[in-house]
Amino acid sequence: MSNGETKTDVILIGAGIMSATLGTILKELAPDWNITVFEKLGKAGEESSNEWNNAGTGHAALCELNYTPEKDDGSIDIAKAVKINEQFQVSKQFWSYLVKKNLIENPGEFIQPLPHMSLVHGEDNVNYLKKRFEALSENPLFEGMEFSDDPDKLKEWIPLIMKDRTSNEPIAATRIESGTDVNFGALTRKLFEHLEKQKVEINYRHHVEDIKRTENGAWEVKVHDMEGGKIEYITAKFVFIGAGGGSLHLLQKSGIPEGKGIGGFPVSGLFLVCNNPEVVEEHFAKVYGKAKVGAPPMSVPHLDTRFIDNKKTLLFGPFAGFSPKFLKTGSMLDLFTSVKIHNVFNMIAAGAKNFALTKYLIEQLMLSKEQRMEELREFIPTAKSEDWDIVVAGQRVQIISDNGALKFGTEVISARDGSIAALLGASPGASTAVSIMLEVIEKCFPQYVNEWEPKIKEMVPSYGMSLTANPELAQEIETDAVATLGLKDARTLQEA
Ligand SMILES: Cc1cc2nc3c(=O)[nH]c(=O)nc-3n(C[C@H](O)[C@H](O)[C@H](O)COP(=O)(O)OP(=O)(O)OC[C@H]3O[C@@H](n4cnc5c(N)ncnc54)[C@H](O)[C@@H]3O)c2cc1C
């Protein structure tokens, strides 16, 4: 990149799954546009999108109990679960399109079929799980889900979890075969390799320091070339801030009124990873439990088979914790420097309203390895400390909205004229990247959406439609994704 003022059509800040997805979609829709990426680290997918920094769950609400709350009348609200499942179907369709077009190869390196299970203890929780199962079973997107409270059946499904379990407490689980484990790090790297071939200019070790509006309504981005030590200025008509935990600071620098009042609260994560291959072989599922009182929804404990570096492994967690950093590679001053006059009262209000969360995070932070092992033993009664190591996961910056509420979802904040957009928040995150990036396109390029719609429908046949209301299309899409992404083959392999 030359020094001085350079022009491009689109700037993507950050080389995580979000920028990778937006860049790939835009290259399909507008192949002639010039896209420039700036990433402060040396490679793509090294922060939250990295396989060791997130849980790799293809979130489709098949097993996550926090997406199906119990209503006051005792019935189960499945609206959020259906929405998240629909979003994941969008991701699967887009990934299938990319594979069919040979734009990315070897889908088995980033997606594997894996049963998704929910596991609960105690009579009330068992009743809840049964009602949840009945409510979801009516929806075609959850077809194939099974429920059991029979210990013998559970021994078949989850032998490691049931081994030497002595408690007489009622126990039940649901299981669905169509779950997945997604290696978002591998997918991000594949998408960036593809973008490089498409002549997208990708600048690693380039730190974006400032964003300013120019007189003609474009954006000027100030970038520090960390290798060359130079400062560069690049202007673009459209900027996407896909900087993960770094997005809030950059949004604040842009000065757009839509970003005013918003704050961020970082929650860090740890996993226990199994180092004993014999134990790893005894488990094959993602098994989600129920969150503890005061725990944020993303801290629901789960025991997951994972596919990382072409190897099967076993992770348990995440344990939450607190660090003021907004990125794993961030600064201890991140939280402090995100406090501005316009958001300070909202941040104080969020702190006051979320006392239970603060207490929970402090307690989690203080846990010793042995105390963490005790939590694991609620899943695997026979777990031995020497078989498990601690790995530090990514940081999640939860959004504090302009009314002082702490939000656990993801949100696109964009300027009214659509010239800049930022993605904040972390959950359900990477799994829903495609539908979130289509939302960015609708918000920021409304003038092109009609023209682009046929191509979007080629990439995502269900675009603009509800799969719940179109079960035949849902079935068609699932069959296609299973064949194209190789999910069926892997399932057969596992059974063999
Ligand atoms: C513990 C944990 C578990 C999770 N589990 C799941 C899961 O099971 N399933 C799921 O779907 N999602 C999960 N997520 C969420 C998911 O990981 C994130 O939503 C997703 O990776 C975010 O992608 P991103 O591209 O926005 O950010 P990132 O992957 O963090 O990428 C942002 C990039 O921007 C760069 N950057 C930052 N600031 C600057 C700057 N100023 N200049 C240049 N570059 C910059 C960073 O270096 C980074 O590479 C989890 C997250 C965590 C932390």
Image (cartoon, rainbow, N blue to C red):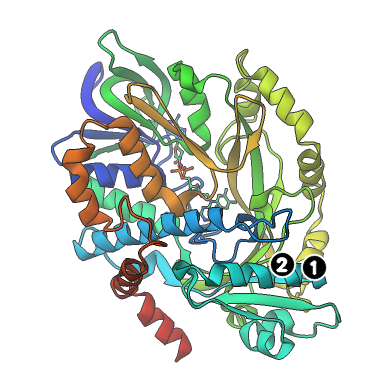
Q: Name the residue under label 1.
A: 124
Which quadrant would residue 215 be assigned to in this image? top left
Picture layout, residue 496 above or below residue 272: below
Local SS, label 2: helix
Report the side of 289 relative to 311 (left or right). right
- Type of residue at label 1? Asp
Residue shown at the point (77%, 46%) measured from the top left: 365
Q: Can residue 297 be seen in this view?
A: yes
- Type of residue at label 2? Tyr
Local SS, label 1: helix
The answer to whether mark 2 and mark 1 are in CB contact below 8 A is yes
Q: Position of residue 235 (x, y in %)?
A: 27, 20
Question: What crowding class fits label 2: few (fewer than 14 Cα within 10 Å), some (14-19), or many (20 or more)?
Answer: some
Camera-side residue: 373 or 450? 450
Task: Give the numbered dot on residue 368.
Answer: none
Residue shown at the point (22%, 58%) measured from the top left: 103
